[in-house]
Amino acid sequence: MITRGPLPVRRTAATLQPDPSRVLLRSFSHGDSSRVQAITARILAMPEETVATILDGVNAEFSQRHRGLDTRLLDRFLDVASECGDPAHLGDARKKLIGSYFLAEYSLESAALFNPSIVAHPDQSGLPEGSLRFVLSLRATGEGHISSITFRTGVLDAASSVHVDPPGGFLTEPRQVPNAHYEAPLFARKLTELGLDGELSRMVLAALGESFTLPGLRTAIDAILAKRRAAGGYPADDAIAKGIWLVGRSNYEVRFEPDQELSRRILFPATPSQRNGIEDARFVRFEGDDAFTYYATFTAYDGRVVMPELVETSDFLRFRFATLNGPAAQNKGMALFPRKIGGRYAMLSRQDGESVSIMYSPNVHFWNERAVLLRPEFPWECVQIGNCGSPMETSEGWLVLSHGVGPMRKYCIGAFLLDLDDPSRVIGRLAEPLLEPLASEREGYVPNVVYTCGSIIHRGVLVIPYGLADRSTAFASVPVGDVLAAIRS
């Protein structure tokens, strides 16, 4: 039993360490067209027996590490086929070999596996009484400090002990959903929020109708641009057209195959805004009118700018990514409440870099106003405070875990309580950390940090998965009644 302030917080034995053997097969670029042509020319000049020998070696070394390797090799060949002259005369073996020179393994979590969030799994069948199956999302960081979302599954038993399933192999990215449809009114509102409305945008949307696909958007943009250029052109058109296309690219859908177990599904950066990472996803099981939807707010990072974005799914097979819009949709640390309050969505945020704010909106994609909810008050949170995941509903109020940054950039986890009907009213907050780094937890990529992106209450116990020093993940638990009593005292 480890006591922090008045609270008996128990660390569990379950710990997740980054595993460099969990690799994903990704496209590998060698540079411009001339470099690609030089490489393919060397492969085209190889004798057939050399092609066969090298390809046999590739299969022997990598077929047990990647599902459907032959298909991946051929798919990648198609990406560079135009640089091979007339590819019609090439045999499958040479095509696969060319494809292999333009692929590479990427170790998803070679640097870190941390900042988890936990939600109830959509499938609760076949469990012992009192148990709960969960989905754990984690931030996996690899080469180049690029972050992606990876998953684990497990069970909380009747005593709220944590049992994490071993992860599967054959990691895969999803396929983009072909011809996913966009709603023109929603898309138009996004353009307006970004200052991209105007004659060009109106002409593009008029050409598309009430619903359209991404290829349709590209065709409409090109056609309208060509028409306006033929009429003499307009100076701002190219920049506006680029902005319209980026908005389209940032709102997309992907789908995994049903036979891919959840721990093998990887959400890797796929758009310009995500180029350098998808960071700190805060998943929540959102209660709708007649079904549950899983939302996650996350930080998209392109190497210079951070942007809050949203992903939603009902089954962890099909994911829909969308931009968050409006003047209040900025900075990091947004976390949705698990249901509407007073007919509106509610979300916690941290726009000023140091305080917790609350926002309401009738539309989950648009956030226009915010109000500061909590400011730093205690020494352990003097630098900044923020949420550590979505609020959890209890009989006494919305329980929210927070993070605070104190001396020597030490991160601790605290908690506060909000009124159920009016969460802009703070009932109380912990004066001391609920969880802080132990001596054995201090060392890592970023020392002296404990941090979580979402916890869960099961059978009266608050279960907290948390990142250690931005390196690995551990679990702690504490009776939720003790936390509520400490907040109210």
Image (cartoon, rainbow, N blue to C red):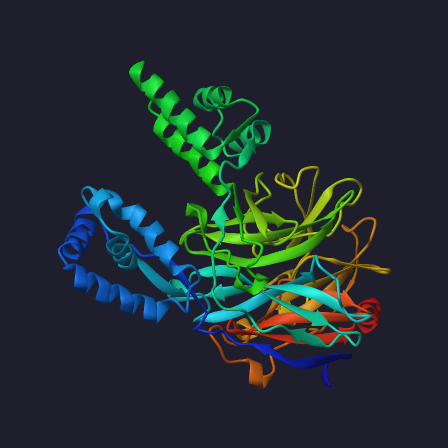
- Which percent across, then down, holds residue 459? 82, 69
- Which percent across, then down, holds residue 101? 26, 59
Q: Count all numbered tags in the image, as a single digit.
A: 0
Compared with 403, 321 (above or below) is above
Compared with 267, 486 (above or below) is below
Quadrant where the N terminus sits is: bottom right
Front-lying residue, 362 or 215: 215
Q: Is residue 382 visible?
A: no
146 displayed left or right of 259:
left
Compared with 260, 64 (above or below) is below
198 displayed left or right of 366:
left
- Which percent across, then down, holds residue 335? 65, 53
The structure residue drawn at horizontal position 21% and vertical position 61%, both measured from the top left corner, is: 51
The structure residue drawn at horizontal position 27% and vertical position 47%, both measured from the top left corner, is: 80
Q: Quadrant of residue 405?
A: bottom right
Q: Is residue 119 visible?
A: yes
The structure residue drawn at horizontal position 81% and vertical position 72%, both measured from the top left corner, is: 486
Quadrant where the C terminus sits is: bottom right
Compared with 158, 218 (above or below) is above
Q: Residue furthest right?
A: 395
Q: Quadrant of residue 167?
A: bottom right
183 displayed left or right of 91:
right
Front-lying residue, 149 or 333: 149
185 displayed left or right of 458:
left
Front-lying residue, 323 or 417: 323
- Which percent across, then down, holds residue 275? 41, 52
The structure residue drawn at horizontal position 14% and vertical position 59%, both measured from the top left corner, is: 47
